[in-house]
Image (cartoon, rainbow, N blue to C red):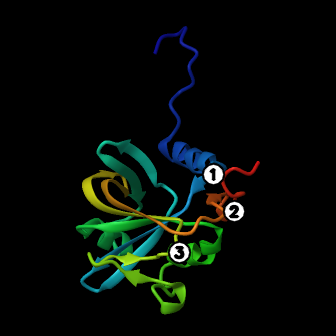
Amino acid sequence: MTMNDTRPAAPVPTEVGEGLKAAFRQHPAGVAIITAASPAGPVGLTASSVASVAVDPAAIVFSVTRATGSAGAILAADGFVVHLVDDEHSALAQNFAVSGSERFTPEQGWRTLPTGEPYLPEARVALRCRPIQSVPVGSSTVVIAEVLEVRHGRPGRPLVYVDRRFHALPPGGEH
């Protein structure tokens, strides 16, 4: 840096991380429930980091913040299902966001696919996937997955996560 350089000094990483969290707290993200079969039984978590990556091959990406519990089981699985959920599933999304909450009960409507993964037929869309690549980034892992099958359920009011809460949007086509 020269004497004439007026660029601010690089911020301390914790300040950048807190700034990033604050920025994305106000950036709406779609809500998904990711499920897999594990040797200990079905596992799942709520994610707001799911995004489409490519159409050929059909691929998505998401991240998890640790490699233990449900996240670790999903990272270890040969396949998983990414459920894009609507407002009617906000309580279920909350259950899957909190460790120790009741999951995979008959009242919640879960079934098992022939391939073994837990499946929620009522989800707007369920994407059966297989991991292609996992990339560790700090305390998170980014997963790139090939979409093997797309199952359409019932359309509803899209669910987004913003400011640490779930919110419903109007159904597609309404303004």
Q: Is residue 67 above or below residue 118?
A: above
136 lies left or right of 120 = left
- The answer to whether the residue labelled 2 contacts the one labelled 1, judged by CB atoms less than 8 Å apart, is yes
Dot 3 or dot 1: first in sequence order is 1
Q: Which amino acid type corresponds to the residue marked 1 in the rendered image?
A: Pro
Residue that sits furthest to the right in the current view = 175
The reply to whether discs 3 and 1 touch (Cβ–Cβ < 8 Å) is no
* Quarter of the image where one finds residue 169: bottom right
Which of the two marks, 3 or 1, is nearer to us in this view? 3
Q: CA distance from mark 2 to mark 3?
A: 18 Å
Residue at 29% from the left image edge and 45% from the top image edge: 57
Of helix, strand and loop, which one carries label 1?
loop
Q: Report the residue marked by disc 3.
A: 122
- Distance between the Cα atoms at labels 3 and 1? 23 Å
Disc 2 marks a residue whose amino acid type is: His
Relative horizontal placement of residue 125, taking residue 70 as reference (left or right)? right
Q: Nearer the viewer, residue 74 or 115?
A: 115
Q: Position of residue 155 (x, y in %)?
A: 59, 64
Q: Residues within 10 Å of mark 2 (few under 14, many from 20)?
A: some
